Image (cartoon, grey):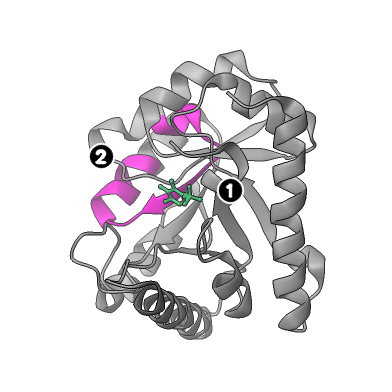
Amino acid sequence: MLTYEDFCLRAAEVEARIAAAAHAAGRPAGSVRLLPVTKTHPAEAAAHAARRGFAAVAENRVQEAAAKRPLAPAALRWELIGHLQSNKARLATETFDRIQSVDSEKLLRHLDRAAVELGRPLAVLLQINAGRDPAKFGAELEDAPRLLDTALACPALRVEGLMTIAPLGATPDETAEHARRTFATLRELRDALADRARVALPELSMGMSGDLELAVAAGGTCVRVGTALFGAR
Ligand SMILES: *Cc1c(COP(=O)(O)O)cnc(C)c1O
């Protein structure tokens, strides 16, 4: 586990990358939030993030986050970015403040029921397979309007926007090209959905350690970064 000082150096580097990309895109530096991804790292990683002033961290597995959260500062918020099965919706709703990986109507209904039972609203993003990657989770682009309609009809869920993961290519150039296209597609989809349903969907969660500049250029508002902050997993 890296020291707090090393973490701070890495965080400053990533923040500088985000600021440069925002500047190049003519966007205010504060329009992109850095979300540290602590998966596979000990609870100390979340403590480092909290100490440096990050409001939230992200995890990709429910059980792992449920085990670590009690060990981290209580004010820290936790977001789920990994695939979620409906039978874990209850524990996920108890464990996370926001779930970014909602990709089916069945899951929406389970989460809504759990949030109603817990007596508090749950923030969600809809995960879209905007790169049409057969290896990735996420709703198909064609299913997004119906998924949004279902989400908006869930009384205990607050839909804040969309999330995606870009597919890898065979070469760095191809990977970058996929990322550019995937992020542009997610943004266009968001604009179309917001227009059609007449709701604000302000959050576009896209970009990771390797492609965050491309996500910021395409209008991303939340970049999820693990490796560049905490080292290789
Ligand atoms: C692990 C993960 C990340 C962070 O990836 P890095 O390349 O380590 O920055 C971002 N998003 C999702 C969905 C992840 O599972």
| First in sequence: mark 1 vs mark 2 | 2
- The residues colored magenta run 92-111
In the rendered image, the vertical position of residue 13 relative to residue 111, given as above or below: below
* Screen quadrant of the N terminus: top right
User: Which of 26 and 65 lies nearest the eye of the viewer?
Assistant: 26
User: Which of 183 and 79 lies nearest the eye of the viewer?
Assistant: 183
| Residue name at image x 48 percent, y 83 percent | 184
Q: How many marks?
A: 2
Percent position of residue 58, x then y: 53, 40
Instruction: Name, please, the residue furthest toward the top.
Output: 71
Percent position of residue 127, x then y: 38, 60
Percent position of residue 56, x then y: 65, 39
Comparing marks 1 and 2, which lies closer to the viewer?
1
Kind of residue at badge 1: Ala
Quadrant in the rendering for residue 73: top right
Q: CA distance from mark 1 to mark 2?
A: 31 Å
Residue under pointer 1: 228
Q: Is residue 182 visible?
A: yes
Q: Which mark is residue 109?
A: none
Kind of residue at badge 2: Ser
Q: Is residue 226 visible?
A: no
Quadrant in the rendering for residue 216: bottom right
In-image side of 41 versus 147 (left or right): right
Q: Secondary structure at mark 2?
A: helix
Under 8 Å from ligand 1: the CB of mark 1? yes
Residue under pointer 2: 86
* Screen quadrant of the C terminus: top left
Check residue 16 for magenta coloring: no
Percent position of residue 107, x then y: 29, 47
| Residue name at image x 49 percent, y 51 percent | 124
In the rendered image, the vertical position of residue 126 relative to residue 74, given as above or below: below
